[in-house]
Amino acid sequence: MEFTERSTTISSSRAVWAGRVLSGLVILFLIFDGGIKLVPLDVVTETTAQLGYPGSANFARFLGILTLVCTLLYAYPRTAVLGAILLTGYLGGAIATHVRIANPLFSHTLFGVYLGLMIWGGLYLRDPRIRALIPFSR
């Protein structure tokens, strides 16, 4: 894809960098999230049990590995779309869990929506294939 106007190139370059920064923030958060589940800290196993899942260290490690694998797929440009799809599914499960136990809407339940918007927003800005697939403007 070749750009003919300088302003289009600049805004496109800025969009790509904004997407990289947004994706980088998501990746750092998810690496932290997956990492604390691998240890696992007491707060992780206690919270997992409060959400209605097994509060065992093995289950927390499973979630940590799952999070890290999906995040690594998202971070690598050739598999970023697959990673975004898998993370969307993972976050959908988290949202459903918070709905099921009636957690607060904006702080807990919709957190997965916020994170999902950041995942797809970052990918949209940094990947021209996604922008071509979902053209918001012409």
Image (spheres, rainbow, N blue to C red):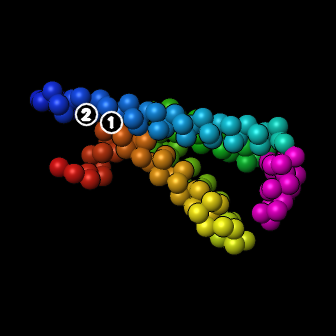
Q: Secondary structure at mark 2?
A: helix
Q: To which quarter of the image does residue 19 belong?
A: top left
Q: Is residue 137 visible?
A: yes
Name the residue located 52 percent from the left edge and 34 percent from the top edge.
24
- Quickly name the residue at label 1: 15
Q: 20 and 53: which one is in front?
A: 20
Percent coordinates x, y for residue 41 in the rendering = 84, 42
Q: Residues within 10 Å of mark 1 (few under 14, many from 20)?
A: some
**What amino acid does circle 2 point to?**
Ser
Tell me, yes or no, whether the highlighted magenta stretch contains residue 129: no
Q: To which quarter of the image does residue 91 belong?
A: bottom right
75 left or right of 67 in image = left
Q: Residue furthest left?
A: 4
Q: From which residue to which does the magenta span run?
A: 42-60
- Quickly name the residue at label 2: 11
Percent coordinates x, y for residue 90 in the rendering = 61, 54
